[in-house]
Image (spheres, rainbow, N blue to C red):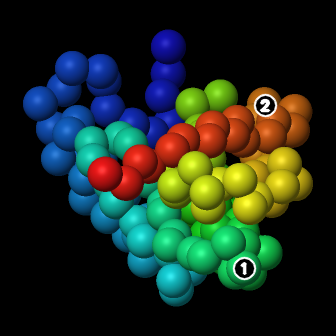
Amino acid sequence: MDLDCGLPQGSSLGPLKLILYAAEMQEVVSRGVSFHGFADDSQLSKHMLVNEIHAGKSTMIDGIAAVELWCRCHGLKLNADKSDVIWLGTRQQLAKMSEADKDLPFQVASYGRQRPFATLVSLLMSA
């Protein structure tokens, strides 16, 4: 199989090259969105209050769009099947959110199909 780019799996240079290659990804993420990368996984997060949910979701969508564009420009694919939205809050905070509030309406292009992000709702219990 001919490869236009990349390294063979198991190469000792693979992890280092990935870190160097993907280091600029965090620079494309929108202001107000935190980025955390570990190996080939990336996490975007944003703290928001329930009354700021619409502006916060818009900021997150902008950040995800920027990462997806960066990935496409660098021959990578943002995998929606392995992507989740997780809302953390107390039971009382999460009860204030409607189902529409919990949805993050972002479609990722994946092999010519559009796939939505999965949504998980978690409780962060206060002691």
Q: Residue at x 57, y 75 (%)?
A: 48
Q: Is residue 100 above or below residue 66?
A: above
**Residue 106: quarter of image:** bottom right
Q: Kindly identify the amino acid type of the residue bearing the numbered disc 1.
A: Asn
**Residue 73: quarter of image:** bottom right
Q: Is residue 6 above or below residue 48?
A: above
Q: Residue at x 20, y 39 (%)?
A: 15
Q: Which residue lies most toward the bottom here?
A: 31
Q: Secondary structure at mark 2?
A: loop
Q: Which residue is mark 1?
A: 51
User: In terms of depth relative to the viewer, which is nearer, 70 or 66?
Assistant: 66
Q: Indicate the position of residue 89 as horizontal and vertical percent values.
A: 52, 56
- Callout 2 crowding tier (Cα within 10 Å): few <14, some 14–19, many ≥20: few
Q: Which mark is residue 111?
A: 2
Residue 29 visible in the current orientation: no
94 with respect to 104 (left or right): left
Check if mark 2's residue and mark 1's residue have beta carbons within 8 Å.
no
Q: Indicate the position of residue 76 as horizontal and vertical percent values.
A: 55, 44
Q: Secondary structure at mark 1?
A: helix
Q: Kindly identify the amino acid type of the residue bearing the numbered disc 2.
A: Tyr
Q: Which mark is residue 19?
A: none
User: In terms of depth relative to the viewer, which is nearer, 117 or 76?
Assistant: 117
Q: Indicate the position of residue 100 as horizontal and vertical percent values.
A: 87, 54
User: In terms of depth relative to the viewer, which is nearer, 8 or 95?
Assistant: 95
75 with respect to 18 (left or right): right
Q: Which residue lies most toward the left here?
A: 12
Q: Is residue 31 above or below residue 23?
A: below
